[in-house]
Image: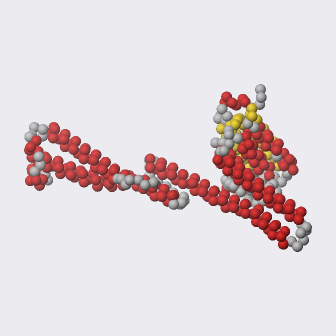
């Protein structure tokens, strides 16, 4: 925004230093006059041009040259205050100049620059370190958004390209009835995948915007419902689901929290051992927080891989398609839903193999903890 030009901070500090020095010198000279020269007539202290050459003559010091000496001293203090104040202000404001240059570079889109201010821990150092931390976080978020855009375009383009290819095959097929059933089935599968991907993106957007009415929910009941929904899938893959835990009342959207728990359990089931795998679902309540933890057996995961699993379109150890029809947004949706409920998602590799996903949410107020909500509705007394 346009602003009226004004004095720079450096010039203001310079004038302040020089003014303070002039004031201190004037007070000191006034004290000398009061205690040593007050008995002399004031007219004798008025400087004359002929007195100025005598100021620097050691044999002519006395009350007669006091007025000229005052003028010389004040003039020297003014010049010294302006020059030294300008240099001192420049030295003091040098860190602020570096911070300003960094903000201008960030405004042009360069987020890789860091200030890395040296020196003692003062206000400027604290400001620079805070700005560096903000730039680091912004750079990570921008990189994540760029990967999201690239992966989303790829995911949306693939089913459309397959559909286009199948339609071209059908149009060029000389036999109108040959293979039509298989073609319809494949088109139906591709279309269903595109619909699932679109719905997942909409759910992700809904969670990010926090467009829901908060209600009272028990995470333990939500976990049980999600587990029951995926029992057939787990049995078909030879996975055992074990649930345990205490009541975990919180406040939020029952539909979104159920989707969060379902995604976590689904992810634990499909990314498990080929046979005889296990999923552990536990809930607990602590002072001010409730926690739901989903663990699964599986292959060994590296910390670098675990750090990227919550990014959109990441499937297991690499970007591959599997038979469970996932669209690669499961954990990304979980992370967004947790953040929309002022909570956090923490992913860590298990020492025995597999993944541990922990969601921590704020607990419901104590006076409402005994309502035992079920999917947003309290049980009748």
- Residue in the picture at 19% in, 41% down: 30
How many marks overall?
0
Q: Position of residue 115 (x, y in %)?
A: 49, 56
Q: Coloured how? A: secondary structure
Residue 114 % position (x, y): 51, 57
The answer to which of 120 and 83 lies nearer the viewer is 83
Tell me the residue at 82%/44% (across/down). 229
Q: Classify 144 as above or below 235.
A: below
Left or right: 172 as drawn, with respect to 361: right
Image quadrant where one finds the C terminus: top right
Whether residue 190 appears in this view of the structure is yes
Answer above or below: position of 253 versus 98. above
**Residue 377 screen position, x and y as percent:** 75, 34
Q: Nearer the viewer, residue 228 or 131?
A: 228
Give the left or right position of residue 124, taking residue 78 as reference.
right
Residue at the location (8% across, 40% down)?
41
* Quarter of the image that includes the N terminus: bottom left
Spot the residue most to the top: 381
240 left or right of 95 in image: right
Q: Residue 359 falls in which quadrant of the image?
A: top right
Residue 54 can be seen in this image: no
What residue is rendered at 19% in x and 43% in y? 29
User: Relative to 268, does residue 102 appear above or below in the rendering?
Assistant: below
Quarter assignment of residue 320: bottom right
């Amino acid at each position: 925004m346009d602003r009226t030009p004004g004095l720079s901070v450096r010039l203001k500090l310079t004038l302040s230093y020089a003014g303070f020095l002039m004031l201190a010198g004037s007070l000191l000279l006034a004290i000398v006059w009061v205690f040593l020269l007050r008995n002399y007539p004031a007219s004798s202290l008025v400087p004359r041009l002929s007195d100025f050459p005598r100021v620097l003559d050691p044999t002519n010091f006395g009350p007669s040259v006091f007025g000229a000496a005052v003028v010389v001293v004040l003039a020297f203090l003014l010049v010294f205050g302006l020059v030294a104040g300008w240099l001192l202000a420049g030295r003091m404001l040098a860190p602020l100049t570096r911070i300003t240059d960094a903000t201008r570079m960030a405004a042009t889109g360069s987020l890789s620059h860091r200030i890395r201010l040296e020196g003692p821990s003062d206000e400027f150092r604290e400001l620079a370190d805070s700005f560096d931390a903000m730039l680091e976080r912004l750079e990570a978020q921008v990189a994540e958004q760029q990967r999201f855009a690239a992966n989303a375009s790829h995911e949306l383009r693939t089913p459309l390209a397959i559909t286009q290819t199948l339609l071209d095959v059908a149009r060029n097929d000389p036999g109108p009835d040959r293979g039509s059933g298989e073609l319809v089935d494949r088109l139906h599968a591709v279309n269903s995948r595109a619909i699932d991907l679109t719905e997942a993106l909409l759910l992700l957007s809904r969670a990010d915007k926090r467009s829901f009415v908060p209600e009272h929910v028990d995470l333990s009941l939500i976990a049980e419902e999600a587990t029951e929904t995926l029992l057939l899938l787990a049995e078909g893959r030879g996975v055992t689901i074990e649930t345990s835990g205490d009541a975990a009342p919180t406040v939020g959207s029952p539909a979104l929290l159920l989707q969060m728990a379902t995604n976590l359990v689904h992810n634990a089931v499909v990314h498990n051992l080929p046979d005889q795998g296990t999923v552990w679902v536990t809930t607990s309540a602590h002072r001010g927080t409730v926690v739901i933890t989903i663990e699964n057996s599986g292959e060994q995961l590296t910390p670098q891989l675990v750090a990227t699993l919550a990014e959109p379109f990441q499937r297991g150890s690499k970007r591959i398609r599997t038979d469970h029809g996932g669209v690669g947004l499961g954990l990304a949706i979980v992370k967004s839903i947790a953040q929309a409920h002022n909570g956090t998602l923490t992913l860590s590799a298990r020492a025995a193999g597999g993944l541990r996903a922990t969601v921590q949410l704020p607990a419901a107020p104590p006076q409402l903890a005994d309502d035992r909500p079920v999917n947003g509705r309290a049980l009748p007394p």
